[in-house]
């Protein structure tokens, strides 16, 4: 359906990386594709996960995070969840059952040492033809950027958060 398949990276300090990935996932569903959407670091009852549940016939959505900010060295729980996410993502990618694989916030997980950049590069290298791989999160390692086919950097020009607007359900969470 999608030919060879490509590697996308959505990175940068601005808002919209996960939102872009979700838009692509919905577009894939509209085309009848099977999607694996793994979220690293995140955990909880979010609007985005509820939305993906509506496409349960086409989307497998998983979260691999404690739901807490990582400060300093990652906890053992963070490491365990990251390893589980990486293993399940690799299994999904190699299963032949999905045309699109999402690793939301995987760049951040790699930046914190929860998963290794080399492990992400190995997924990119072993990605079967016909599988699109999407990796999101700020601070993408230059090696991931170099290995990708498409890289989009989100940069903040203006954000209402600085004016005191808190994260809102359905918009940021």
Image (cartoon, helix red, strand yellow):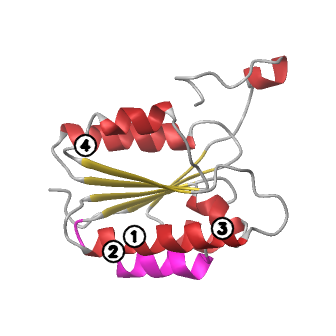
- Please identify the quarter of the rendering in which residue 25 is found: top left
Locate residue 86 relative to residue 66 in the image: left or right.
left
Q: Can residue 141 be seen?
A: no
Q: Can residue 172 be seen?
A: yes
Residue 35 image point, x, y percent: 29, 52
Residue 3 image point, x, y percent: 19, 63
Residue at the front extreme, as displayed: 77
Question: Residue visible at 26% across and 44% down?
Answer: 28
Q: Considering only order in the chain, which callout, 4 or 1, is on the residue closer to the N terminus?
A: 4
Which residue is under mark 4?
A: 56
* Mark 1 to mark 4 CA distance (whole Å): 17 Å
Locate residue 27 relative to residue 107 in the image: left or right.
left
In magenta, the rendered stretch is 116-130
Asked if residue 167 is among those painted magenta in the image, a careful observer would answer no
* Mark 4 to mark 3 CA distance (whole Å): 28 Å
Label 3: how many residues lie within 10 Å, few (<14), some (14-19) or many (20+)?
few
Kind of element beneath mark 4: loop
Asked if residue 128 is among those painted magenta in the image, a careful observer would answer yes
Locate residue 108 relative to residue 123 in the image: left or right.
right
Label 4: how many residues lie within 10 Å, few (<14), some (14-19) or many (20+)?
few
* Mark 2 to mark 3 CA distance (whole Å): 21 Å
Question: Residue visible at 31% across and 70% down?
Answer: 93
Residue 32 image point, x, y percent: 15, 44
Q: Considering only order in the chain, which callout, 2 or 4, is on the residue closer to the N terminus?
A: 4
Q: Kindly identify which numbered label has been placed on residue 91.
A: 2
Kind of element beneath mark 3: helix
Q: Kindly identify which numbered label has been placed on residue 121.
A: none
* Mark 4 to mark 2 CA distance (whole Å): 19 Å
Label 1: how many residues lie within 10 Å, few (<14), some (14-19) or many (20+)?
some
Q: Considering only order in the chain, which callout, 3 or 2, is on the residue closer to the N terminus?
A: 3
């Amino acid at each position: 359906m999608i030919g060879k398949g490509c590697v996308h990276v959505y990175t940068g300090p601005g808002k919209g990386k996960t939102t872009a990935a979700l838009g692509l996932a919905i577009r894939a569903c509209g085309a009848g594709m099977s999607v694996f959407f793994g979220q690293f670091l995140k955990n909880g009852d979010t609007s985005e996960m509820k939305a993906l549940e509506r496409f349960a016939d086409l989307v497998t959505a998983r979260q691999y995070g404690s739901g807490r900010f990582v400060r300093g060295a990652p906890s053992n729980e963070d490491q365990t969840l990251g390893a589980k996410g990486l293993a399940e993502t690799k299994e999904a990618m190699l299963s032949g059952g999905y045309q699109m694989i999402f690793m939301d916030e995987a760049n951040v997980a790699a930046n914190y040492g929860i998963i290794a950049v080399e492990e992400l590069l190995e997924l990119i290298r072993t990605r079967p033809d016909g599988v699109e791989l999407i990796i999101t999160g700020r601070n993408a390692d230059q090696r991931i950027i170099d290995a990708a086919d498409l890289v989009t950097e989100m940069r903040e020009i203006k954000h209402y958060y600085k004016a005191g607007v808190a994260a809102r359900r359905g918009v940021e969470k």
